[in-house]
Image: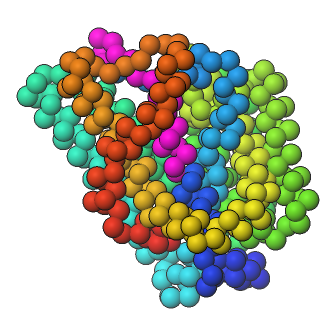
């Protein structure tokens, strides 16, 4: 095991792994852009409710196989945590202090944002008696569930590091098997509540897989291609079995979601995405060595976390401005029209402009360095 840890240290040692930085930042940005571009707000007596074009456009769900990147983000997070722990050990830092420092670095900004929105919602409700403000605040804060899962994985690091050292790749097999058993109990025997165990098991597996990142990098290219095809065939088989939906995100109206809670399909998606990023690695590493691409990589890593934290705040501000100017709440008709599709660049640019002030205020600290 010590030889493997040493090898991992060399992969992320003195020379920074630019590709892992790219994957981490881009995966966050993809989530943000997806929310901006494909969230359809509808207003009713109870206030705003979100939907998406996935429920109205045939075949669009296939895009989620590429753009549902949370499995990839947790995979990258596992590698980053292992590398950070190796460096902490060299400095004599204990596991408790290491875990607490990482939890605090992420939890404090997320908690501060949540408290600010809860306070704002409370003031609006007390002063203006707006009954749906609580629902609106919940929509703004709902993407932070991902932060909660990430914090859970950080808290479990002592256990997962021990399992990795003691049982190596068997841990991945056990977690994959456990996720499948949970699906059987949930979908075959109707034990719906047990499905939420997969919030720990599936995302824990993605995070644990990141501990093997150095071995994936060292694999021959033909095995990278084999990994990609294995994940793709598993996705096709599971989706077209008739048991699981094709979309990797929740679709309004579907009886089952692959994300809430995650199903075994997300394990297949993880394998597919790991294979894909390894196949793309040589080309991307060459690009990232170029000065302009290097600058882009550094810039998006500096602001990616802040962008994720505040992107729904930017959406809310834009909707508030629209309401103030037009006198009616913002919303879209469904199914989406051709005009709606043509407006997607504006649907990204508008919230971005409203989010930029928060990036300038809170983005002075390099988030990529802080998260390491």
Q: Which residue lies furthest to the bottom in this view?
A: 91
On the rendered structure, is 233 left or right of 111?
Answer: right
Residue 10: image location, x then y, percent: 69, 82
Residue 320 vertical position relative to residue 10 in the rendered view, above or below: above
Which residues are drawn in magenta?
A: 28-47
Q: Nearer the viewer, residue 345 or 20?
A: 345
Whole-percent x and y of residue 112?
27, 53
Q: Residue visible at 56% across and 82% down?
A: 87
Can residue 196 be seen here? The reply is yes
Residue 352, relative to residue 250: is it above or below? below
Q: Which residue is depicted at the point 41% across and 51% down?
A: 307
Compared to residue 93, the image places residue 282 above or below, namely above
Q: Which residue lies furthest to the left in this view?
A: 127
155 lies left or right of 16: left
Could you say which quadrant of the image residue 22 lies in? bottom right
| Residue positioned most to the right | 222
């Amino acid at each position: 095991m010590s030889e493997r840890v040493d090898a991992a240290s060399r992969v992320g040692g003195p020379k920074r792994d630019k590709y892992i930085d790219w994957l981490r930042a881009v995966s966050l940005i993809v989530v943000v852009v997806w929310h901006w571009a494909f969230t359809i707000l509808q207003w009713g007596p109870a206030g705003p409710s979100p939907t998406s074009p996935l429920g109205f456009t045939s075949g669009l769900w296939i895009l989620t196989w590429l753009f549902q990147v949370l499995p990839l983000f947790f995979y990258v997070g596992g590698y980053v945590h292992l590398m950070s722990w190796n460096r902490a050990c060299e400095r004599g830092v204990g596991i408790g202090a290491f875990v607490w420092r990482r939890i605090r670095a992420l939890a404090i900004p997320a908690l501060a944002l949540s408290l600010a929105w809860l306070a704002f919602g409370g003031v609006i409700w007390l002063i203006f008696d707006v009954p749906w403000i609580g629902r609106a605040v919940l929509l703004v804060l709902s993407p932070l569930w991902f932060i909660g899962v990430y914090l859970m994985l950080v808290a479990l690091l002592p256990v997962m590091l021990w399992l990795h050292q003691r049982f190596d790749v068997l841990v991945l097999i056990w977690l994959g098997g456990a996720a499948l058993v949970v699906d059987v109990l949930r979908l075959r025997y109707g034990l719906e509540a047990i499905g939420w165990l997969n919030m720990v098991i599936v995302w824990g597996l993605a995070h644990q897989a990141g501990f093997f990142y150095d071995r994936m990098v060292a694999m021959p290219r033909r095995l990278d291609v084999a990994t990609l095809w294995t994940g793709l065939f598993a996705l096709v088989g599971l989706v077209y079995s008739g048991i699981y939906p094709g979309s990797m995100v929740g679709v309004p109206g579907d009886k089952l979601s692959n994300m809430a809670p995650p199903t075994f399909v997300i394990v297949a998606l993880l394998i597919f995405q790991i294979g894909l990023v390894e196949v793309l690695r040589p080309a991307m590493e060459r690009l990232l060595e170029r000065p302009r691409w290097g600058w882009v990589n550094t810039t998006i890593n500096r602001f990616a976390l802040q962008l994720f934290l505040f992107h729904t705040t930017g959406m809310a501000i834009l909707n508030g401005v629209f309401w103030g100017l037009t006198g009616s709440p913002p919303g879209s008709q469904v199914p989406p029209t051709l005009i709606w599709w043509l407006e997607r660049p504006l649907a990204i640019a508008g919230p971005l402009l409203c989010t930029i002030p928060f990036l300038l205020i809170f983005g002075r600290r390099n988030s990529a360095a802080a998260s390491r």
